[in-house]
Image (cartoon, grey):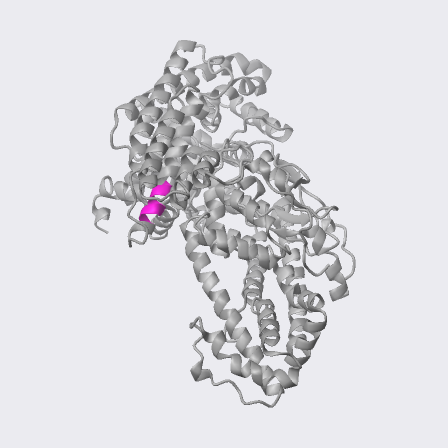
Amino acid sequence: MSAIGDPGGALLGLLDSVGDDKLRQVVRLVEATGQRPTLEPALAAMRPRLRQLRPPRPLTLSRLLTVPFEAALVVETSAHISFTVCRDRLGRWQGEAMDGLPPAVRERARSATLGHGADDQGVILAAGRDLWPAAARSLAAGAVSDEEPAIAGERHRVVDLLAIGPVLVPLLGRLLPLAVELDAEERLALEESLALAAAGPGDRLGVVASILLRGTAQPWAMARPLVEAAPAGHRDRLRGLVEQLLGEHRRELQRRVAALAGATEVPLAELAATLWQVAEALDAPDTSAADAGAGRGDMQALRSQAAETAATHYSSAIETVVAPLPPPGAAERGAAVRAREETARRLARLGRAARRLAAETPIHRVTEAAVERLVDVDAARRGTGQPLVDVDDARLIEILAGPDLAWRYLRPDGPSDRSQRDRRGTRLAGPG
Amino acid sequence: MLEVRLSARRRTFSVKQRPATFAEAGVAAPFTTPAIAQARLRLDARGRMEIVARNPTGGDGVYVLPLKAASEMFRLSIHDRTLTERLEAVQPISPLTIRRIGLELAREGLAGLDARDAALRAIDDDEQHALLTLLLLLEQLLKEAGQPRIDWKAIDTGDRQARERLKPYFRRLEPSTGMVGTDLVSAVDSLSALLAPVGLEGAPFESLAAATLADLRKLRTSVADWARDEGPELAAVAGLVVECAALSVRCAEQSLAKAGELVRTVGRLLAAHAAAPESVGEVLTRPIWLLHGWRHLIALWSSVADRSRDVQRDTMVELGELVPLVPLVADDWLNKDGEKQRPQYELRRHVRLMEDWRSGLTIERQAMIERVQAASL
């Protein structure tokens, strides 16, 4: 695999070109061989897709240590959000914490995690109970007086989250990803989390609010429930923090959309995942209600820009998808059909994101025009009285435009759905 | 994070909800439209086909609707539109006829290329197995009649004319069976069609029933092992799957033995079949009915073998919803006592916003169902 030597470039291209199952296998292999740190840049670029695919990850000691502050991690390029921990410094905090751990605590945690997965909540809570506070003490001891304020602030944040890990992690486990509608049990967990946060020193309330808002697909919709769940004396302070965080989040989304708008080489899966996330975030009934820092205009501008970006990329990508296939019987036909369907599903997701962002988006028109071109090509090869498309193309139309249109092309003379014959008299055979 | 929890709570199924008869349980159909995936087909009081589907809201209970109303209630995939058309012409509805239609549709490519490849292999295997079964039945008949055995060297099971070459052997059996050649060929042919998926002692292939039974035993063990690390809610669902699997295994083993007894003397089987073909067919196909529906669950569980625990939990909930409940009528075969009381838990299902089978945005889910279908053919 020559791509290993160039993790940032060739491997990324390779990973984007493979299907979901293959990508999962690659990640499993990378995890099993301990190559994750080396290949992290390439895998980081695939994060939105990996988050959806949820490949299994072994529960290593480093991973266990990170659990209390994992939800606060952000990559450097999106570090304009307050109360977070930069992913680039993850290794540093892990290393410092690990170095100062009492050997007995470290060994106990290591043996407890052996053979378990990173989503094994019971093992994580049991093994982390001693480890996290010990790691907090170790990390706090490593602080020096002349540390950069940003680093010192981040150290303080990680130390605090590790110290309250045994209480906070089970609460977050019940809450994240934060539901659009909370049930009684979740509301109670949210109140306990915010009470724990409000009782803490320094910026703990902001850190927990940031984790919760980043842990929901619809942060604007969650702003009010979050404030209402805080202890009475802390609601005004939390409201201010939430407004600040939502403002930062909106600007972050604007940056990401702007980057996508101008890009020509973005993998379709990443494009679809990111714009879907934006569409979801903006899906709340009143996305500007809790974001006093931004006017409705800013939100509307973000929505329009995201919709336009999605539509532009969709229009250019669909041309490739409806390009003619190798003829039936050709050796490479099967692989081409499989690859085309995989791409079409990603494209359909992008189209759905565009429609969620703006109802008047031209996705429907673009799709129908592309389908018509596909059918023309197909029909030219066919005699009369036959389906206008073959099954492979009908399936492509189904993915892109839905089964109604696909059915019309596949069965132009067939019975409509509502004129099925009476099936009276059909018999169920069997042993009683 | 792109995931959102929605309120999708439902109580766990109970073995107490077992249908009384196979007719009430119906036959699982290979729908690819996510809302009705693995929905069961059965006849209503007026003999018309109806669908029994999971509650589309994700809540308790099932939806029962006429088959012809399916296209009005759901946006059916092109596969399922063709399936509902073909079902019109099917008589009778049984696991084997539904399997045949599923294979035909898959062969046409309506469930994707993986399913097409799997269907081609399965159809080829089915044909070979039917011919081999016919040969074994014929061989046994010749032996019982004291006639010379088949010259195996002259028979190529891959040859489409193989059945023609067997005619002389059938003619030799006319006196002992009291049947004319064509009737005899037709009777042995229909018996071999019934027996091939069930299996025959000494057959040089693994029958559909035997393969499913072996996979079902593995599923039972795998789910039981998996459940050890789970909390009470999912352990209860897994327990239900294990219990239903165990019951299906026990019933299927017993009915396979019963079918084996019936085949011990082929001459007598032939006479019984000529006198009461439906009764013979019922006994011979019992294992298929008992194991029906499990292949999808086996493929579904195996598709998440290397996925994260969270994905496996979601899949376990789905297994619990789809688990084939052996009809109560089968208890008589095992002299089994009534069911014990057990606690019922409420399950919370974690679903992705706008990607769930209830959202209508189902492309990815349909693709997953097609992959599972390809693995289960």
Q: Is residue B201 left or right of residue A303?
A: right
| Residue A69 within the magenta-colored segment of the rendering | no
Residue A260 point in image, percent of width and height: 30, 26
Seen at 67% across and 82% down, the residue is B178
Q: Where B137 sits versus B339, above or below?
A: below
Camera-side residue of B180 and B316: B180
Res B261 seen here = no
In the image shown, does A399 or A278 lie closer to the viewer? A399
Expressed as whole percent of the image width and height from the top left, the position of residue A117 reads 46, 48
In-front residue for pair A93/A346: A346
Q: Residue B348 location, x and y as percent?
A: 61, 38
From where the camera sits, is residue A359 visible?
yes
Span shown in magenta: A335-342
Residue A46 lies, with reference to residue A365, above or below; the image says: below
Q: Residue furthest front?
A: A384
Q: Considering the image in quadrants, where does the N terminus of chain B appear?
A: top left
Chief SS of the magenta region: helix
- Of B201 and B151, nearer the camera is B151
Q: Residue B314: where, in percent of width, then height?
A: 54, 43
